[in-house]
Image (cartoon, grey):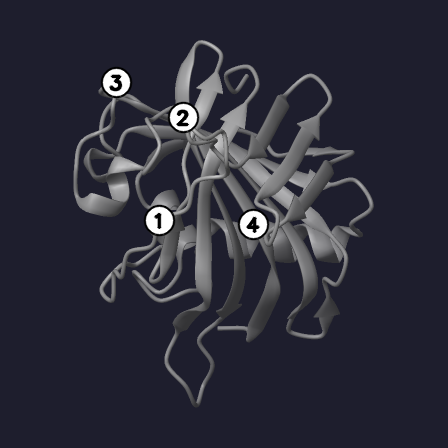
Amino acid sequence: MPEWHLKGRNFSHCNCAYGCPCQFNALPTRGHCEAVVGIVVDEGHYGDTKLDGLKFGGVFQWPGPIHEGHGQAVPIVDERASPEQRDAILRIMSGQDSEPGATFFQVYFSMLEKVHDPIFTRIDLDVDVNARKARFEVPGVVEARGEPILNPVTKKEHRARIDMPEGFDIRWPRLDGAGQRRPARSSSIFRTRTLISASSTSPARASFADEAWNARARGPSPA
């Protein structure tokens, strides 16, 4: 199994109410899950292939809760990536080079029954984790925005923190809100991530930054 490493920023945007029921072992707000995920790789490699500065993501849909499977996905990879980088990113996304449960990639892709052909195109993705703001656009595929929720009385940015030591996706999130997204309220998560693959000398593992952010998001439903 090749050794790989990713360090970067992640913006995830789903159709559930803010707080993301998945993080609390609850069912999706509307009975099904639709989501877009975008990642900026600040530092990374897959074997000898450098991945610094690339962006990738995907569009996901499950007819019910994610753990029941039967989902679909469309991987999206930065058009600037070389053939070797494209292959590396797709293998990381698919969880092929991760132990079961070691990364959120492996968990989510194991719940899919169909993965559509990847799209190689321009990805406009800006993620400011500290400000809890993001913009994620892929021409003709994705248009999503994220921003902090405002207190309905004071109009100040809302913040809340919880501790989930056994969370596979988030360990120390700040549940900072949600808001309006056509057609309804939705959830977004901003976070910094460090993901490390399995190697011949160490088990697969995923480590996360001390803080992650939920915020409100605006934009049309995923294509």
Label placed on residue 30? 3
Pointer 2: what residue? Answer: 153
Query: Where's residue 41, x and y in %?
Result: 67, 58
Q: Say if 70 sits above or below 46 in the image.
A: above
Q: Which of 182 and 86 is in front in this view?
A: 182
Amino acid identity at mark 3? Arg
Q: Which of marks 2 and 3 is nearer the N terminus?
A: 3
Instruction: Name the quarter where the C terminus is drawn.
Output: top right
Q: Compute the Cα span from label 2 to label 4.
A: 30 Å
The correct choice, above or below, for 104 with respect to 218 in the image is below
Mark 4 neighbour density, 10 Å: few (under 14) some (14–19) many (20 or more): many
Q: Residue at 24% of width from left, 28% of height from top?
A: 28
Look at mark 1 in the image and give the residue it sits on. 160
* Image location (x, y in percent) of residue 16: 33, 26
Residue found 25% across the figure and 34% down from its top: 69
- What is the number of callouts on the image? 4
